[in-house]
Image (tube, rainbow, N blue to C red):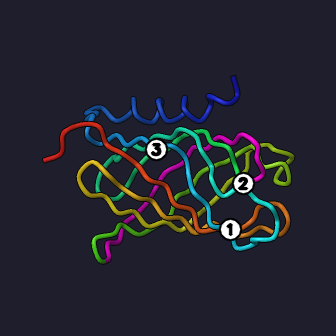
Amino acid sequence: MKRWIGLGLLGLSLSAHADLQADRLWVNAGFYSAHFDTDKGLRNANPGIGFEYRLDDTWSATAGRFRNSNDANSSYVGVYCQPWTWAGMKLGVVAGAFNGYPNAKNGGWFPALIPTASLERGHWGLNVALVPPLKDRLYGAVSFQLKYRFQSVQ
């Protein structure tokens, strides 16, 4: 049941947005993380399922579940704030919460603030995040998340 909390919170967030539009919904199959500590035996491929709903040009809600770098299941829920644009990319941060990392809060939920860049063209998009290292609790990486929008795009 706990594993669906993040997805439930996304649903609540979306229901508060009265004029839902299907072409604002993105789906992803997890992440690929290029870790800074290459000698720790960390998992780079982080498959899963995630959703992102673009509320407007600056804000998006996101939630999902994936297999993390420690080879454990993780969930996340958060909000992107990307007020700047440079070379066609949206720039900002994602603020949210993660769980499932054995060395961080014994696998429990913890807050995160992560710098991000997003490129969106037609049906395809890419989120790039700079995950900061947190001592021996969370290993740093540049994380890539390919996303797809199903609805027609104008």
Whether the residues at callouts 1 and 2 have beta carbons within 8 Å, the answer is yes
Question: In x, y percent, where is residue 41?
Answer: 80, 61
CA separation in Å, label 1 and label 3: 20 Å
Task: Residue at 55% x, 46% y: name it.
Answer: 30
Residue contact at pointers 3 and 2, CB within 8 angstroms: no
How crowded pointer 2 is (Cα within 10 Å; few <14, some 14-19, many 20+) is rated as many
Badge 3: residue crowd in 10 Å (few <14, some 14–19, many ≥20): some
- The image shows residue 106 at horizontal and vertical percentages of 87, 46
Q: Is residue 36 magenta?
A: no
Tell me if mark 1 has few (under 14), some (14-19) or many (20+) residues whose alpha carbon lies within 10 angstroms of its own: many
Element type at marker 1?
Answer: strand
Instruction: Give yes or no for residue 81 being in the magenta stretch.
Output: yes
2 left or right, relative to 119: right
Query: Which amino acid does the dot numbered 2 rest on?
Result: Ser
- Quadrant of the image for the N terminus? top right
- Mainly helix, strand or loop, the magenta region? strand
In the rendering, which numbered label is found on residue 28?
3
- Residue at 62%, 53% in the rendered image: 45
Structural distance between the alpha carbons of marks 3 and 2: 17 Å
Q: Which residues are magenta?
A: 69-86
Tally of numbered discs: 3
Q: Give the residue number, with chain letter if any, for mark 2.
A: 69
- The label on residue 35 is 1
Question: Which residue is at 85% across, 65% downward?
Answer: 136
Q: Amino acid at mark 1?
A: His
Q: Residue furthest top?
A: 1
| Disc 1 from disc 2: Cα separation | 9 Å
